Image (cartoon, helix red, strand yellow):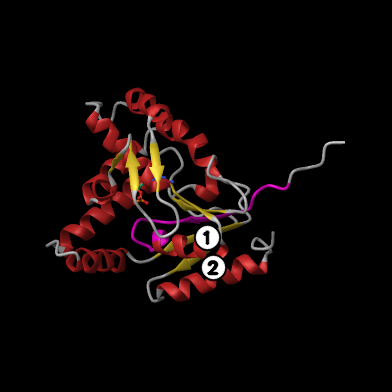
Amino acid sequence: MIEATVAVPVLAIDGPGGAGKGTVSRLLAAALGWHYLDSGALYRILALAATRHGVGLEDEAGVAALAPGLDIRFGTGDDDSVWLDGEEVSAQIRHESAGTMASVVAALPAVRQALLLRQRAFRQAPGLVADGRDMGTVVFTDARQKVFLTASAQERADRRYKQLIAKGIDVNIGDLLADINARDARDSNRAIAPLRPAEDATVIDTTRLSIPEVVAQILALVTENGAGVS
Ligand code: DC
């Protein structure tokens, strides 16, 4: 008799850009000893690859065709570096403009389809913390725990402003807020996999919460429903 295989547990963390998903998800993965998927980085890398290959960002078939052939590697643990075809592209893909380009290619159905299996391949024992926009609604619909992290657009712009100023990058807070609002609108209004909480997600507004508070709340949820028990 074939025994039913117990699926590797997934903790899905979705939400808009700047809500703290990346930082929180990495800390959760470290605390649980699970793998981490930064799905936004895949869209950012694909957009970068398209510009390098001279493929227009709205060229749906052209961008999707690039996806299977890309050699993408992520650092593990504390190492958040990313390589594309053997070259480190961490700084380039973290740029504001790369986020906007990613949001453009992410609205194309064939592109999302082309990245689907690549994302699912990250599901490996003992577990996966998956960070994105549609982890709970499309990619890992059977995730044991789904969280939707949000924060006001003003708070997200303030956080980003502080990060950039700390790095010595001079930015205008009004421009940042406008970019955030434009990206939210594009991600939320697209026809395919729009940004929205899964029906069974726990929504956490991080506007007035510290990072350790958010991590503690999510760990409590995971432990409550047994996702942390292997
Ligand atoms: O999380 P991020 O800022 O790195 O994501 C960049 C863009 O990629 C974001 O504006 C929308 C898109 N994205 C997506 O559509 N689906 C995901 N699972 C992750 C990101």
Q: Is mark 2 within 8 Å of ligand 1?
A: no
User: In the picture provided, is 95 more to the left or to the right than 73?
Assistant: left
Three-letter residue code for mark 2: Ile
Image position of 63 with respect to 25: above or below: above
Local packing at callout 1 (Cα closer than 10 Å; few below 14, some 14-19, many 20+) is: many
The reply to whether residue 57 is visible in this rendering is no
For residue 93, above or below residue 31: above
- Place of residue 11 in the rendered image (x, y in percent of width and height, measured from the top left): 56, 56
Element on which disc 1 rests: strand
Disc 2 to disc 1: CB gap under 8 Å: yes
Which segment is the magenta one? 6-22
**Which residue is pictured at 61% across the width and 65% down the height?**
222
* Residue 17 left/right relative to 174: right
Residue 16 in magenta stretch: yes
Dot 2 or dot 1: first in sequence order is: 1
Pointer 2 residue: 218
Which secondary structure lies at badge 2?
Answer: helix
Residue displayed at 16% across by 62% down: 174
Amino acid tagged 1: Val
Q: Which mark is residue 147?
A: 1
Q: Residue furthest front?
A: 86
Question: Nearest the camera: 81 or 172?
Answer: 81
* Image x and y of residue 149, in percent: 45, 62
Q: Is residue 221 visible?
A: yes
**Which is nearer the eye, 207 or 34?**
34
- Position of the N terminus, as image quadrant, is top right
Residue 183 forms part of the magenta stretch:
no
Residue 121 at x, y = what percent? 54, 39
